[in-house]
Image (spheres, helix red, strand yellow):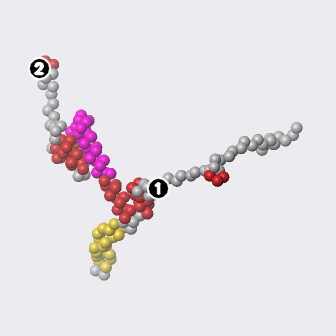
Amino acid sequence: MAEGGKHPGGRPSTYDSSYHPVKAAKLCKLGATDAELADFFEVSIATICRWRLEHEEFCESIKIAKESLADARVKRSLYHRAVGYTYETTKLFNGPNGVVEVAHTEHVPPEVTAQKFWLINRCKDEFREKQETVVTGADGGPIKTENVVYSGVLAGEDKTI
């Protein structure tokens, strides 16, 4: 109670620390947005935002789940670009009786850049981007250096005495 025995005001929070972070993480791994989280917990989007600010475990569970979902989607997309993929679509054609919709199988060929990126990062021992250069002297010995002093006229210097 607040000063003078009065209630501090406002409605009590509906947040449950033993339940909400776990459920929120599961929903986010399935691709749930903040609006969908709010709908699931039967609260407003503003409440979801407030829970993130007030409850670190809730914020972290959502953050980790959304990051892992995003990472997984990018990995899957990179893989499909590296090996190629096929998908079903429809195409529209002008026929003698008007526009005709035809089912079509579209093939996206593998992409060399995606393959290179995948191999460099996944098979580091076999495929490297790094090049090493070793410089040695004659017969693999040390490099010999000499200090040479040049005397004479420098470019742009006045030659008159």
The three-letter code of the residue at mark 2 reads Gly
Q: Is 124 placed left or right of 59 in the picture?
A: right
Q: Pointer 2: what residue?
A: 5
Question: Which residue lies at the image location 31% right of the left edge and 81% below the top edge?
Answer: 96
Question: Which residue lies at the image location 37% right of the left edge and 64% below the top edge?
Answer: 83
| Residue 50 lies in the magenta-colored region | yes
From this view, report whether residue 114 is shown above or below residue 67.
Answer: below
Kindly report which numbered mark, 2 or 1, lies closer to the viewer in this rendering.
1
Q: Disc 1 on helix, strand or loop? A: loop
State if disc 1 and disc 2 touch (CB < 8 Å): no
Q: Is 26 placed left or right of 113 in the picture?
A: left
Q: Residue furthest bottom?
A: 96
Q: Taken as a whole, is the magenta stretch helix, strand or loop?
A: helix
From this view, report whether residue 8 is shown above or below residue 110.
Answer: above
In front here: 150 or 95? 150
Q: Position of residue 109 (x, y in %)?
A: 39, 68
Q: Which mark is residue 128?
A: 1
Q: Position of residue 75 (x, y in %)?
A: 34, 55
Q: Which region is colored magenta?
A: 46-71
Measure how far apart labels 2 and 1 are at the Cα level. 71 Å
Q: Position of residue 117 (x, y in %)?
A: 42, 57
In front here: 157 or 141? 141
Asked whether the viewer can see residue 46, the reply is no
Question: Which residue lies at the image location 24% right of the left edge and 48% below the top edge?
Answer: 28
* Dot 1 crowding, Cα within 10 Å, few <14, some 14–19, many 20+: few
From this view, report whether residue 11 is shown above or below residue 156.
Answer: above
Q: In which quadrant of the rendered image does the C terminus lie?
A: top right
The three-letter code of the residue at mark 1 reads Arg
| Residue 73 lies in the magenta-colored region | no
Asked whether the viewer can see residue 148, the reply is yes
Q: Which comes before the other along the chain, label 2 or label 1?
A: 2
Q: Position of residue 130 (x, y in %)?
A: 50, 53
